[in-house]
Image (tube, rainbow, N blue to C red):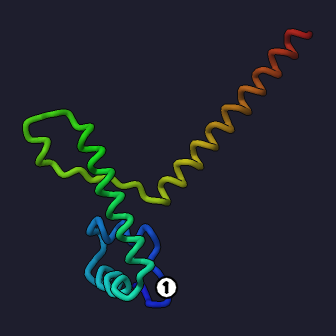
Amino acid sequence: MVSQARHPDEETLIALLDHELNGAERAAVDSHITTCSHCEEVLTRQERANRALAGVLAADLPAVGHADSIPVRWRVRPGVGAAGAGVLAGAAGALIVVGLLTRRRRSVAIAA
């Protein structure tokens, strides 16, 4: 539930746009948005971004007979993006450490 004192998080607003909220959640968020200009603006920006991204992705689709009738939906949740970046940074760090250790072992073996 969303109270008037607390704004819904970005993920909840995205879930609202994607019709993923149940009736009570949707009613609470809709009620909040009608009285909160900040959240209404965030929701409007997200809707514009979704439409722009859908247009770009639709332009990349091959020209198949019925491709125009297929709606394009693309979304990246903020939590997923941050987790993916963390995993990628961790993997890159591990590869660097392994590379440095392997290089050090080779230089020690050559010197001996």
Q: Quadrant of residue 111?
A: top right
Residue displayed at 49% across by 53% down: 81
Q: Quadrant of residue 95?
A: top right
Residue displayed at 18% across by 52% down: 71
* 64 left or right, relative to 25: left
Circle 1: element type: loop
Q: Amino acid at mark 1?
A: Arg
How far from the left and from the top, in percent, is residue 10? 44, 69
Residue nearer the viewer, 45 or 88: 45
**Residue occupying the far right of the picture:** 112
Residue displayed at 24% across by 44% down: 58
How far from the left and from the top, in percent, is residue 56? 30, 45
* 111 left or right, relative to 96: right
Q: Which residue is mark 1?
A: 6
Residue nearer the viewer, 88 or 66: 66
How far from the left and from the top, in percent, is residue 106? 80, 15
How far from the left and from the top, in percent, is residue 9? 46, 73
Q: Quadrant of residue 19?
A: bottom left
Q: How many marks?
A: 1
From the image, which quarter does the C terminus lie in?
A: top right
From the image, which quarter does the N terminus lie in?
A: bottom left
Question: Callout 1: 10 Å neighbours few (<14), some, many (20+)?
Answer: few
- Answer above or below: position of 59 versus 36: above
Residue displayed at 33% across by 86% down: 34
- Answer above or below: position of 4 versus 43: below
**Residue occupying the far left of the picture:** 65
- Answer above or below: position of 106 versus 5: above
* 62 left or right, relative to 57: left
- Answer above or below: position of 65 versus 49: above
* 109 left or right, relative to 12: right
